[in-house]
Amino acid sequence: MSQTVFNHTEASKVEAFLRQRLNPELKVQMRQRPDECAEIYLGSECLGVVSKNVDEGETSYSFEITILDIDLDDL
C-alpha cells in the first residue's frame, strides 16, 4: 500500500462526506506542507487526521480519531 499527496479537491469531497454522514460542522484542513493527510476539526478542536491510501490502483481514505486520556477523565 502506498500513500500519495492529499489534495484540495479530495479534501473538499471528504469534508462533504463527513459532514453528511457524521456532523455538518466538521472541517477538513490541509496541512501547511504537501502531505498524505489532512486534519479534521470540529470547531477549534482537532479530532484527528484523514489519510489517503492507494493500493493496487484503488484509493481509500482513513479517518483516525485521537482521544487523549485526559479527555476521558470527566466522563
Image (cartoon, rainbow, N blue to C red):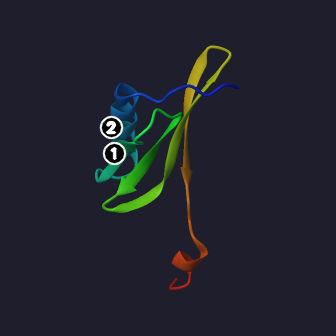
Regarding mark 1 in the picture, which secondary structure is present there?
Answer: helix
Locate residue 66, reporting x and y percent.
56, 60
Q: Kindly identify the residue that appears in the image at 30 percent across and 61 percent down.
A: 43
Left or right for 48, reference 26? right
Residue indicated by mark 2? 16
How many angstroms separate mark 2 from mark 1 (CA)?
A: 5 Å
Cβ–Cβ under 8 Å for marks 2 and 1: yes
Locate residue 45, reporting x and y percent.
38, 63
Looking at the picture, tell me which residue is in the foreground, 46 or 31.
31
Task: Classify residue 20 by image quadrant.
Answer: top left
Regarding mark 2 in the picture, which secondary structure is present there?
Answer: helix
Q: Work out whether 61 lies above or below 65.
A: above
Residue 19, label in figure: 1
Locate residue 70, reporting x and y percent.
56, 79
Which amino acid type corresponds to the residue marked 2 in the rendered image? Ala
Q: Kindly identify the residue that appears in the image at 38 percent across and 34 percent down.
A: 11
